[in-house]
Image (tube, rainbow, N blue to C red):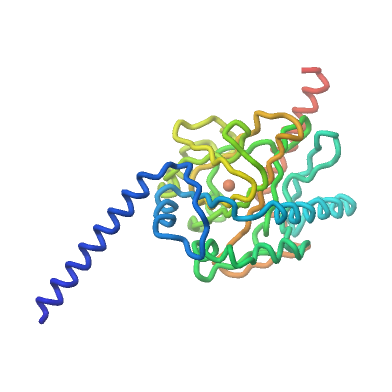
């Protein structure tokens, strides 16, 4: 009897190994630019693609009317925050630049779902359930944790402070706090058409599995913007959803277009699995934000000086 059971379990192991190989071969055959469809579950191929490369794109997850409704909320939040003269939200600094007409333009909004029921309801829509479970069965939307639901607007005009972002991994924050690097998946909803030429997210596939040395030393954090021979450009259409592993090396390339057409809008939803750590209006600013603030100030001064010198 035992011999039969052993034979059966050996057969089971072998057929599972063959299925794994078939799956890997299927993933190998897929181009990195594959646009997947988000269904009720993440399929084995989608999961294997994500595990292999550290990112995945789901096409047309949100409709244009939904994107328009969210963006109307963002514009209303901007009006409110500018009128209040806000510098921070729950301790997180606002990035305020200028738009193409020279008006104040908030480029990074934190905690948006705490200020809009439309956004709060949208990020809880059942269609995102498979994505939430990809992060973890117990994952929750961190409305008032970390930086909350973040809305980014990249605009390439003179006076802007947030055209691009240098090479980094999101693990640096964990190293800064002397804790082990925790997996962090970045889930982004894209509002604009974005091609390799018009800038956007660049990522080195597979680097989410690198060791600590490569995480620390592969590139100088945030200062390096040099294209990497192994990087890929994540090209998006309005309504696409991307998931990328924050442990992979990534950067944001500035747009080759100048003016209002360069606008690129992305909303990031934080799915969290660690202990509940709510923030509020009196929360302190995390120390690493001061470095970012100093860098943006220096960049702004340099731009103003250049403009004065007529160069
Ligand atoms: Fe990042």
Q: Going 74% across and 50% down the picture, which residue do you hit?
A: 93
- Furthest-right residue in this view: 83
Given residues 241 and 141, the one toward you in this image is 241
Q: Is residue 277 above or below residue 252?
A: below
Q: Going 42% across and 45% down the picture, which residue do you hit?
A: 206
Q: Is residue 281 above or below residue 231?
A: below
Given residues 254 and 27, the one toward you in this image is 27
Q: Going 61% across and 59% down the picture, which residue do you hit?
A: 270
Position in image of residue 92 (x %, y %): 72, 54
Position in image of residue 213 (x %, y %): 42, 44
Position in image of residue 243 (x %, y %): 53, 52
Q: Is residue 33 left or right of residue 20?
A: right
Q: Is residue 163 left or right of residue 136?
A: right
Q: Is residue 176 left or right of residue 153?
A: left
Quadrant position of the N terminus in the picture:
bottom left
Given residues 237 and 186, the one toward you in this image is 237
Q: Is residue 37 left or right of residue 210?
A: right
In the rendered image, which quarter is residue 157 located in? top right
Quadrant position of the C terminus in the picture:
top right
Position in image of residue 144 (x %, y %): 69, 64
């Amino acid at each position: 009897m035992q011999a039969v059971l052993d034979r059966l379990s050996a057969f089971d192991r072998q057929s599972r190994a063959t299925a794994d190989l078939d799956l890997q071969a299927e993933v190998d055959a897929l181009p990195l630019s594959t646009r997947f469809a988000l269904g009720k579950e993440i399929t084995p191929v989608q999961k294997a693609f994500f595990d292999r490369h550290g990112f995945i794109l789901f096409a047309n997850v949100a409709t244009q009317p939904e994107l328009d409704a969210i963006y109307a909320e963002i514009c209303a939040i901007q009006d409110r925050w500018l009128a209040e003269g806000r510098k921070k939200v729950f301790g997180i600094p606002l990035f305020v630049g200028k738009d193409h007409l020279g008006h104040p333009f908030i480029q990074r909004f934190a905690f948006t779902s705490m200020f809009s029921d439309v956004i709060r309801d949208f990020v809880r829509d059942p269609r995102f359930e498979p994505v939430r479970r990809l992060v973890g069965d117990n994952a929750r939307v961190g409305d008032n944790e970390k930086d909350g639901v973040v809305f980014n607007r990249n605009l390439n005009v003179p006076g802007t402070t947030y055209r691009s972002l240098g090479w980094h991994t999101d693990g640096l924050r964990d190293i800064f706090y002397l804790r082990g690097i925790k997996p962090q998946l970045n889930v982004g909803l894209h509002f604009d058409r974005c091609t390799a030429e018009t800038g956007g997210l660049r990522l080195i596939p597979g680097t989410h599995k690198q060791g600590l040395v490569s995480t620390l030393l592969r590139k100088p954090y945030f200062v390096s913007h040099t294209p990497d021979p192994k990087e890929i450009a994540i090209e998006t259409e309005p309504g696409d959803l991307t998931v990328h592993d924050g442990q992979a090396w990534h950067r944001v390339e500035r747009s080759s277009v100048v003016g209002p057409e360069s606008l690129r809008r992305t909303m990031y939803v934080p799915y969290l699995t660690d202990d509940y750590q709510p923030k509020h209006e009196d929360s302190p600013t995390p120390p690493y934000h001061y470095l970012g603030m100093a860098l943006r100030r220096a960049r702004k001064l340099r731009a103003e000086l250049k403009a004065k010198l007529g160069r």
